[in-house]
Amino acid sequence: MKNLISFFILLAVSGCKKTPETPANYDFKINTSRSIGTSTLVLKSIRDSRCPINADCISAGGVQAFFKLTTDNTDREITLCKGVCGPLESSTTIKIDGINYSLKLINVTPYPQLQKSDNTQTVKVELTRT
């Protein structure tokens, strides 16, 4: 009988594995916003210093995306970077409705090109509950 009880306890405990959250992907253009829970995330600007396609550059450069997260009437400035960024990171932790999330810069498109300046850039980020 003890073995049977131990078996059911073991079965119950082993069934309690935390399943990983599926990341949510969001695309932003300048001044577009997304509601996430009771918060709002807005892409304020992009600084793109990546080496253009078919150009000869000393450095590959990097791209920075500047966001504003508004939660409970409090604004937080967030800067995410890909490429040569110095101390900046491509992801950060944010808290929305008391839950921690990882906000990660996935890509900024289109990639810069020589003699083409009227590109409307799109920033793709990934939001994952941690």
Image: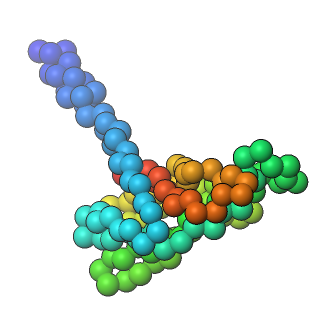
> In this orientation, which residue lies closer to the viewer: 103 or 45?
45
Residue 5 vs residue 63: left or right?
left
Which quarter of the figure has residue 42? Answer: bottom left
Residue 73 visible to an observer of this rendering: yes
> In this orientation, which residue lies closer to the viewer: 60 or 117?
117
Report the residue that reaches farthest toward the front.
115
Report the residue that reaches farthest toward the left.
1
Residue 2 visible to an observer of this rendering: no
Vertically, is 59 above or below 68?
A: above
The x and y percentages for residue 28 are 42, 60
Residue 9 vs residue 129: left or right?
left
Q: What residue is at 51 percent from the left and 61 percent from the top?
A: 120
Vertically, is 106 above or below 13?
A: below
The x and y percentages for residue 24 are 35, 48
The x and y percentages for residue 94 are 43, 65
Report the residue that reaches farthest toward the bottom.
73
How many numbered dots are placed on residues in this image? 0
Vertically, is 87 above or below 44?
A: above
> In this orientation, which residue lies closer to the viewer: 39 or 30?
30
Colour theme: rainbow
Q: What residue is at 71 percent from the left and 62 percent from the top?
A: 49
Which quarter of the figure has residue 41? Answer: bottom left
Q: What residue is at 49 percent from the left and 56 percent from the top?
A: 122
Residue 1 vs residue 33: left or right?
left
The x and y percentages for residue 87 are 71, 64
Q: What residue is at 44 percent from the left and 50 percent from the top?
A: 126
Residue 48 vs residue 13: left or right?
right
In the rendered image, the quadrant that contains the N terminus is top left
